[in-house]
Image (cartoon, rainbow, N blue to C red):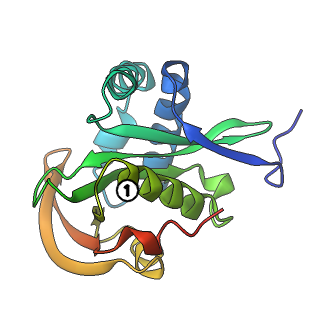
Amino acid sequence: MTATTDQPITIRPARIEDAASIAHVQVKTWQATYRGIVPDTFLDTMDEAERTKRWATFIERSCADTTQPFVIVAVHAVAGIIGYAAGGRARSEDAQSLGELYALYVLPLFQRRGIGRQLVAAFARELLARGWNKMVVVVLEANPACGFYEALGGHWMRTQTIEIGGVPLAARVYEWPDLSSLTQGP
């Protein structure tokens, strides 16, 4: 059966058995999105098996302890997991009330269909449930998704440098001082 983009999408917390699918989405979206931005050698050597192990550990920790970072997945009725959002307590700043969206990726075939918005809304609801009322995301400045975060009401805070594949890259930090604006999603 061929996966069509008009099939129902379910948003739910990730389970351990989702690790390989999440790793697949990560590798494929990085290779599609960051080609020409991140060094090709880094993208070409991304290993799904190694990333599956990392995601399994990440998910296992989140299932065992609600203070740990977590993952939410978008599941297509035919294609399976086609996107995910991952994050938790901010890795910098005021970690008492600030959550961070560490990663948001949707396979290219399913982009521009509202799935990213659904994932962000579910992610924001989970942050609020865990006691975090603000959120940040760090996005490579050359990433076309900057417009997505701006359309969601993200306020540019600052630019910082992050390193990927041994190369320093400019990144924008966006903030949502009130997560309730993001929870209005399907």
State whether residue 150 is above or below residue 183.
below
Q: Quadrant of residue 82?
A: top right
Where in the figure is residue 141, as x and y percent of width and height?
A: 28, 71
Q: Nearer the viewer, residue 178 or 107?
A: 178
Tell me if residue 40 comes above or below residue 94 in the rendering: above
Residue at image point 33% right, 70% down: 142
- Crowd band around label 1 with a 10 angstrom C-alpha radius: few (<14), some (14–19), many (20+): some
Residue in the image at 86% along x and 38% along y = 2
| Vertical comparison of 184 with 5: above or below | below
Q: Nearer the viewer, residue 60 or 143?
A: 60
**Residue type, label 1:** Leu
Q: Residue at x 89, y 32 (%)?
A: 1
Residue 15: x and y in percent read 52, 25
Which residue is tagged 1? 128
Q: Assign a secondary structure to mark 1.
A: helix
Residue 144: in sight, yes or no?
no
> If the image is split into quadrants, where does the C terminus sit?
bottom right
Q: Residue furthest right?
A: 1
Q: In the drawing, does residue 105 fall left or right of residue 163?
A: right
Residue pictured at 24% horizontal, 71% vertical:
172
Q: Position of residue 29 (x, y in %)?
A: 49, 48
Query: Would residue 10 appear left or right of 144 to someone viewing this image?
Result: right
- Asked where in the image residue 174 lies, by quadrant, the reply is bottom left
Say whether residue 12 is left or right of residue 32: right
**To which quarter of the image does residue 41 belong?**
top left
